[in-house]
Amino acid sequence: MGTNTTNLLLTDMPVFVRVVENGSFTAAARQMGMTPSALSRQVKRLEETLNTQLLERTTRNLRLTEVGAQIFERSQSILDVSNEILVLAELAHDVPKGTVRVSAPKALGKQVIHPLIPEFLERYPEVNIQLVISDQKLDVVADKLDLMIHITNKPVEGLVARALTSVSQVLVATPAYLESNGLPAHPKDLSDHSCLFLGETPFDSVWEFHSADEDHTVNVTGRYSVNHTEARLDAVLNNMGIACLPDFVVADALAAGQVQKILSQWELSGAYQGRVFVQYLYSKYLPPKTRAFINFLRGHLEPDVFRNQANTANTGSLISEN
């Protein structure tokens, strides 16, 4: 095999891999910023170079031939090795540079991760951040992520998991609302209050409480439900009722005395709480850009930082739980 043939292979193999990974020429072209016809020509050229059919094409689907599947697997390995070589070159200079693509849940991404980005970009001028904010379940490989930040007590198996902090749910209302409507002494008292909840499923209005001596479930009601944490907090601040919110969402309002915690001796169950992990594919050579961002996050998101803020906040409440 001559040098020209080898060069063609190295040029066309990445295109072939991206087409297979994306399941179509159109999707791969969108990702690579090329036209489907251009990608099709490169894959066809690869088949001619190898004198082998790699893909069976129909009007709707692409399917790997038997030999195509074998070549795809080895092509992926070659690309992985190429990426390791690039990382080794970066490590030689140990200067973080390039783009870090990272995902995070909506509320955490917007209110916790996003505010940290300006400082990181200023500290590392050769690194770009692409933040993907989504509550959808993403996949590091399929979604081309360098890092995935999520709230869970069960990290994804097969990925490296580094703990960042933790999130818990807090029940809050304004002192004005509580002065007018009374302070709940027990979770069952919430039945007599206007409660603000997510409203996406019937279970969003079912709040579960646990204490050292008792478990209690209450089906709350209220005139307003909204599937956005900032909107629910805004409704609370407008004296519209009691809401269950992540501690990082209410930390500032608690510190300013705008809201106060309710039933603080009880623990709430439910989604959007637990430990916050950053996860990524294992690599012997973690790129400096990725390592820099992980270390930056760990330096700013200490364990239980939001819980501690909520517990030490001066609520300035008008109503006492005692």
Image: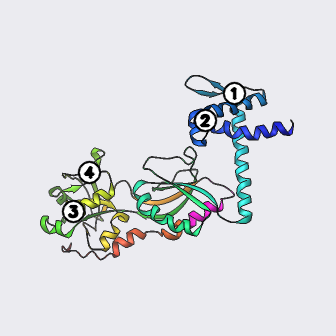
* Residue under pointer 1: 66
Q: How many residues crowd mark 4 within 10 Å: few (<14), some (14–19), many (20+)?
A: some
Task: Residue at 39%, 58% (x, y): give it.
Answer: 273
Q: Give the range drawn in magenta.
A: 281-295
Give the CA separation, mark 2 to mark 3.
51 Å
Res 35 label: 2
Q: How many residues crowd mark 1 within 10 Å: few (<14), some (14–19), many (20+)?
A: few
User: Residue 74 lies in what quarter of the image?
Assistant: top right
- x then y, percent, for residue 296: 55, 67
* Residue under pointer 3: 238
Asked whether residue 282 is drawn in magenta, I would say yes
- x then y, percent, for residue 134: 44, 50
- x then y, percent, for residue 197: 27, 53
User: Residue 13 lies in what quarter of the image?
Assistant: top right
User: Closer to the N terminus: mark 1 or mark 2?
Assistant: 2
Q: Can you tell which of label 1 and label 2 is closer to the viewer?
A: 2
User: Closer to the N terminus: mark 3 or mark 1?
Assistant: 1
- x then y, percent, for residue 222: 19, 52
Residue 19 drawn above or below residue 304: above
Quadrant (top left/top right/bottom left/bottom right) for the C terminus: bottom left
* Residue under pointer 4: 206
Quadrant (top left/top right/bottom left/bottom right) for the N terminus: top right
Residue 99 visible to the viewer = yes
User: Closer to the N terminus: mark 4 or mark 1?
Assistant: 1
Per the image, label 3 sits on a secondary structure element best described as loop
Per the image, label 4 sits on a secondary structure element best described as strand
Residue type at mark 2 is Thr
Give the CA separation, mark 2 to mark 4.
50 Å
Residue type at mark 1 is Glu
Left or right: residue 137 compared with residue 168: right
Give the CA separation, mark 3 to mark 4.
23 Å
Q: How many residues crowd mark 3 within 10 Å: few (<14), some (14–19), many (20+)?
A: few
